[in-house]
Image (cartoon, helix red, strand yellow):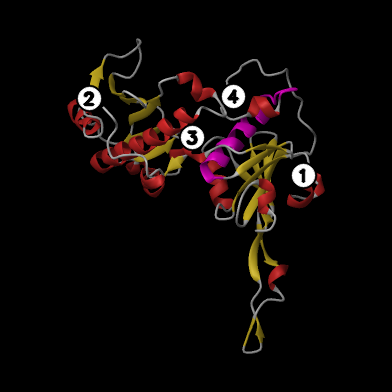
Amino acid sequence: MSYTQTLVPPEHATNHLLVVPEVWGPDRVRSLADAWFPEVRWLKEPRAEVDPRARGGARFRGMAAAPEPQVGPGVLGVGDEHGAAGPFAVSESQSPQAGLTGRAAVYALGRVDGTPDARVGRPATTEDRDGIARVFAAGLPDGEELRLVQWGVAVARKTGGVLLADGRQLLHPDPTSAVDLTLYAVHPLPPSELLGLLRSVVATADEEPPPAPGAAPVRLAARTPYDGTVVVESERVDRVPRALVDLDPTEYGPHAYRMVWVPQDPYELGLEQPSGVHVIARSRMRAMIARLTLLLHAKVGGAMVDDGAFLATTAEIERRTSEDQRASSRAWV
């Protein structure tokens, strides 16, 4: 039995199915779309409806329990020709079919007119962090469809969900593979103070010259013998990510602080299944970059954006610092 026979209506059986935990409701999914696409809009508004499963529920003093309200499917316009139909409810008993636990929701990604997209040639690169080349080995999506698939994978990583490419090929990105963060703040921090923050995490950190003309004017590097290097770049930018457009301008600014992990073998960044050594180092550096970002945020404020180009909350970043108990408060030096 295919996933689509039980997760979505038949007309969406060949769409790309984005499955997210139920807590990620329509408004939150729309905000994730706004972070990637211009002019996102509801072509059909989701509607409140009653969950029929609750009608025969428990009784109290002879009265039936009130039916549980659910959100009926709508259609979110994403791009010129594509959209996300949903949410379609997924029960706790159904969610294991998609590799999840607990109640979830499905959004069917595809053309709003229902016609299939044309596919281009086979993948030309061996780098495939997200598994997209693997599941589309016979022919890659192109243009707007490819962007929609890439967004779906990024959302799956952000939310702990999955993407079923063409309704059947499972893409289940590891949420802990998201490491890099960028902070956008109103006020600049002098390089000496920024270096002091970094040295509070890695004592051997130092300032480096820009690697190329036009690169960020302030570049710091903190090297470790086992886990790779944390690179911090600071500069004033002319544009900020779309994820910040709905924030009050006082909540962020033009001063960007990018915190990036460079592993011992950068080639592994492009692998869907990197080595165990890489994963262990990544776990420690993910926690380290999160701590550094929180220190910087406490100093200059601003808004944080993750490497999926989505807004990241303080609570999300704090969770990164405690995910892996093996990650120490300081790197090995």
> Alpha-carbon distance for marks 4 and 2?
33 Å
* Label pair 3/2, CB-CB below 8 angstroms: no
Residue type beneath disc 4 = Asp
Among numbered discs 1 and 2, the one appearing first in the sequence: 1
> Is residue 275 placed above or below 169 in the rendered structure?
above
Q: Which residue is mark 1?
A: 12
**Of circles 1 and 4, which is in front?**
4
- Expressed as whole percent of the image width and height from the top left, the position of residue 323 reads 41, 45
> Is residue 287 placed above or below 230 in the rendered structure?
below
Label 4: how many residues lie within 10 Å, few (<14), some (14-19) or many (20+)? some
User: Residue 165 sits in which quadrant?
Assistant: top right
**Of circles 1 and 2, which is in front?**
2
Label 2: how many residues lie within 10 Å, few (<14), some (14-19) or many (20+)? some
Horizontal side of residue 184 vs 159, given as left or right: left
> Alpha-carbon distance for marks 1 and 3?
30 Å
Residue type beneath disc 1 = His
Residue type beneath disc 3 = Ser
Q: Residue at x 65, y 55 (%)?
A: 46
Q: Which residue is mark 4?
A: 128
Q: Which residues are magenta?
A: 137-160
- Expressed as whole percent of the image width and height from the top left, the position of residue 133 reads 65, 24
Identify the element where label 1 is drawn: helix
Residue type beneath disc 2 = Thr
* Label pair 4/2, CB-CB below 8 angstroms: no
Among numbered discs 3 and 4, the one appearing first in the sequence: 4
Residue 98 got which mark?
A: none
Marks counted in the figure total 4
User: Is residue 265 visible in this depiction of the protein?
Assistant: yes
